[in-house]
Every structure is written in C-alpha cells, then in structure tokens.
Amino acid sequence: MLADVTDLLACPQCRSPVELDEGAILCDAGHAFDVARQGYVTLMTGAGGKFDGDSPEMIAARADFLGGGSFDPLMDAVADAVVAGAGAGDDPRILEIGAGTGHYLARVLDATPTGRGIGLDVSKYAARRIARAHPRAGAVVADVWQHLPVRDHVLSHVLCVFAPRNADEAHRVLAEHGSLVVLTPTERHLGELVDLLGMVRVDDRKVERLGAAMSGRFERTGHVAVEYPMSLSHLDVTRLVGMGPSARHLTSERLASSIAALPQEYPVTASVTVSTYTRL
C-alpha cells in the first residue's frame, strides 16, 4: 500500500519529501496529489511522456498470461537476483520501473519478507493492477524519462523487466552499493512467433547499449541466462502477443488468422538474461 512507501517518495514539482494525509500525497510546499479510489497516485508534472501507457486490453492480457505461470521462471530469476544482490540489508526498498501488472514486484516482495516496493508505470491501468498486486507495494503513475518521484539514495534495488531504464535516475535513487536488476530478452526469445506473427523484433545491440549506459555509474556484478521451452495454447499466444508492443502493430483479424493455423499446443522459447549492476 502507498502508506508503506510514502517515506521513499518525493514531490514531482519541488522534489521535497511527502506524506500521506486523508487520501492525498502532500509536500511542505503545498503541492497535493490525490490518491485514486483504486489505491494509486499520479506523481507527474503534466509534461508529456516519451511513451504511451499500456491500454486496458494490454494490461488485462498481461495479467492473464503471467497468471498462467509460463513466465514463472523469469520472475523467480529476478527475485533470486534481488536476494543475492548487494544493498538489501534488513530493509529492502525496491522500485520496479514499468511494473505493468506488478507480478514481478510481488514475486520479489514474497522473497524478501521485510521488503517494501514501489511499482511505477506510466499507465493508470497498470497502476490499478499494481495497487492490489501485493500488500507491501505502492502504485505510482509516473514517467521513467522524467525525474522520478523518489527521494535521493533511499532504495536498495531498482528493477527493469522488459522495460526502459534511465541510468541517471536509477543511480540517483539508489543508496550506496544498491543494485539495478535488469531483465532483457535475447534474440531467441519468442523466436518461433516473431517472424510468423510479425512481432516486434529484439534489437541486436540492446545489451551493448545497456552496458554503455551503465558505464561509470554501475559495475555489473551478476549475470544469469534463463532459457527454457514453453508449450502455449492458442489463447496463451493471443495473450502473449496482446500484452506487448506488438499489440499496437497487428490487426486482430491478422493475428487471429495466424494463430488459428498453429498447432493447438505450440512450442515457444523463453530466453532472457538477468543482469545485476551495483551502484558505484
């Protein structure tokens, strides 16, 4: 809940500490941000974001697919990286950027019984899901490419799972020796579907650019490859495509026709790397 993480948040306008009072987030300068009835708060200055937030349909598809368990090994790998990473101490304070439905953050919090988490996403539909993802998670609508509404050096971990990462801001909000945990897909991830369905392809230079962005701010201290076969039904494939960026580029008619031609249980590869970077 927001009450568990308010001490970690900052006003997006003046960057001062905030408190939760009678259904609003307030700072000493008088800036106020109402908490929505679904339990999340929007902490943005009003400037346009760099990315569009996920639609209700995309969030629903993601919740259904992740709830089915096919990506459980990915969630476990992220949780293991947090538990093993530096900076946890007795009070893990975790931010997930682009948290979506909050499934990954919830898995991490289950693995850290004294942990608290902020799930941040630019989509209010995502924030509604995050708000009920875990009792120790608070949901915030904000843009990763703006100044994050989080106080300086208060976090033990920042998570980026299939999400953009802002190295400067992650460095600012992490405490000394805090950890940035990044999950990125390899070129083999969902390879059986990419060409067949015209899905968005993984950028071959993504890992190279990630390393360059971390240079001088972080040291890579952990690297785990996770790859395994999945057997997906037509409904699973529909949800998998519908929860990601490919949903913006494929018509429902083309997608339905292509999926109908697949075997009832279709083999698909999950392939990612989970990297841990320690703040310098």
Image (cartoon, rainbow, N blue to C red):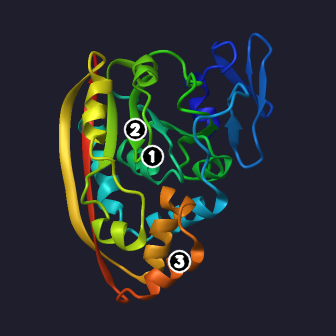
Q: Residue 254, which numbered label?
A: 3
Residue 67 visible here:
no
Task: Tell me whether the residue at label 2 lies in contact with that at label 1, contact meaning CB atoms closer than 8 angstroms.
Answer: yes
**How far apart, in angstroms, are the residues tagged by discs 2 and 1?**
8 Å
- Between label 3 and label 2, give the one nearer the viewer: 3
Q: Residue 159, which numbered label?
A: 2
Identify whether 66 is placed above or below 25.
Answer: below
Q: Amino acid at mark 3?
A: Arg
Badge 2 density bin: few <14, some 14–19, many ≥20, Cα 10 Å: many
Residue at the (61%, 51%) spot, across then down: 126
Residue where numbered disc 1 is placed: 105
Identify whether 40 is placed above or below 189.
Answer: above
Q: Position of residue 278 (x, y in %)?
A: 27, 25
Q: Indicate which disc, 3 or 2, sits on the residue closer to the N terminus.
A: 2
Q: Locate the N terminus and report the quarter of the image it occupies.
A: top right
The residue closer to the viewer here, 234 or 6, is 234
Residue at the (56%, 59%) spot, across then down: 248
